[in-house]
């Protein structure tokens, strides 16, 4: 059995706390609780940053190593953009990897695994295909950084590719990224 801290789910939880706490401005106890949860999630995600990979990595919670990051590039490494916590330097590195045509920047959308990765498999669920829902999370994440020209251009291009892909192929669970 394995135990993994998933940065994508943690980022979605963090974003949920950020949004929901605003509904509880009048209930100071709930507001403070949600603020505390958000801060804890933000620290947890921040500790998952990898300059080498250019994104946030999942953690192996059973590892006895000091560095328990799982060094496997995947679409998950970009999902924390949704929480808006990346520094300008981190955003720059994320965009460098995200728009790399040998890795993630495909003719369609962002695949689940880099195209040049030895683990890439076109017909294995989370080993290669493009998932519109995951790409939507990246689009929503990039909204947090529209003041950055490269982020704005990347946001617009992924959005346009998403619309075109669905118009041409219909809406499906996943698509071929090649």
Image (spheres, helix red, strand yellow):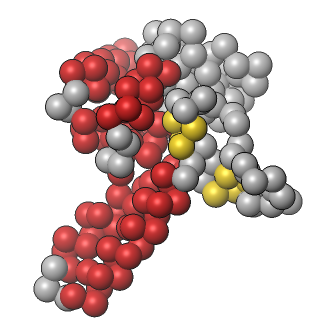
Of residues 47 and 144, which is closer to you in this image? Answer: 47
The quadrant in which residue 50 appears is top right
Residue 97's x, y, as percent? 49, 21
Residue 29's x, y, as percent? 28, 90
Q: Quadrant of the C terminus?
A: top right
Q: Residue furthest left?
A: 26
Q: Residue at coordinates 29% horizontally, 82% vertically from top-left?
A: 32
Left or right: 2, with 20 as reference point:
right
Residue 162's x, y, as percent? 35, 24
Left or right: 52, with 80 as reference point:
right
The quadrant in which residue 156 appears is top left
Residue 39's x, y, as percent? 39, 67
Q: Is residue 157 visible?
A: yes
Q: Residue at coordinates 66% horizontally, 13% vertically from top-left?
A: 116
Of residues 70 and 112, which is closer to you in this image? Answer: 70
Q: Is residue 2 above or below residue 127?
A: below
Of residues 75 and 135, which is closer to you in this image? Answer: 75
Tell me how many marks there are.
Answer: 0
Q: Residue at coordinates 55% horizontally, 25% vertically from top-left?
A: 111
Q: Is residue 59 above or below residue 118?
A: below
Q: Is residue 54 above or below residue 5?
A: above
Q: Quadrant of the N terminus?
A: bottom right
Q: Is residue 160 visible?
A: no
Q: Residue at coordinates 35% horizontally, 63% vertically from top-left?
A: 16
């Amino acid at each position: 059995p394995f135990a993994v801290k998933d940065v994508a789910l943690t980022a979605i939880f963090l974003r949920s706390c950020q949004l929901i706490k605003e509904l509880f401005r009048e209930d100071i106890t709930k507001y403070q609780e949600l603020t505390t949860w958000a801060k804890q999630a933000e620290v947890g995600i921040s500790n998952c940053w990898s300059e080498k990979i250019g994104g946030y990595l999942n953690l192996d919670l059973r590892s006895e190593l000091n560095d328990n990051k799982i060094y496997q590039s995947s679409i998950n490494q970009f999902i924390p953009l949704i929480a808006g916590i990346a520094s300008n330097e981190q955003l720059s590195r994320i965009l460098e990897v995200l728009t790399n045509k040998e890795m993630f920047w495909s003719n369609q959308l962002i695949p689940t695994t880099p195209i040049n990765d030895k683990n890439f498999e076109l017909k294995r669920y989370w080993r290669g295909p493009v998932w519109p829902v995951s790409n939507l999370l990246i689009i929503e994440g990039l909204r947090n950084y529209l003041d950055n020209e490269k982020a704005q251009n990347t946001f617009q291009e992924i959005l346009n590719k998403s619309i075109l892909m669905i118009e041409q192929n219909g809406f499906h669970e996943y698509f071929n990224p090649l």
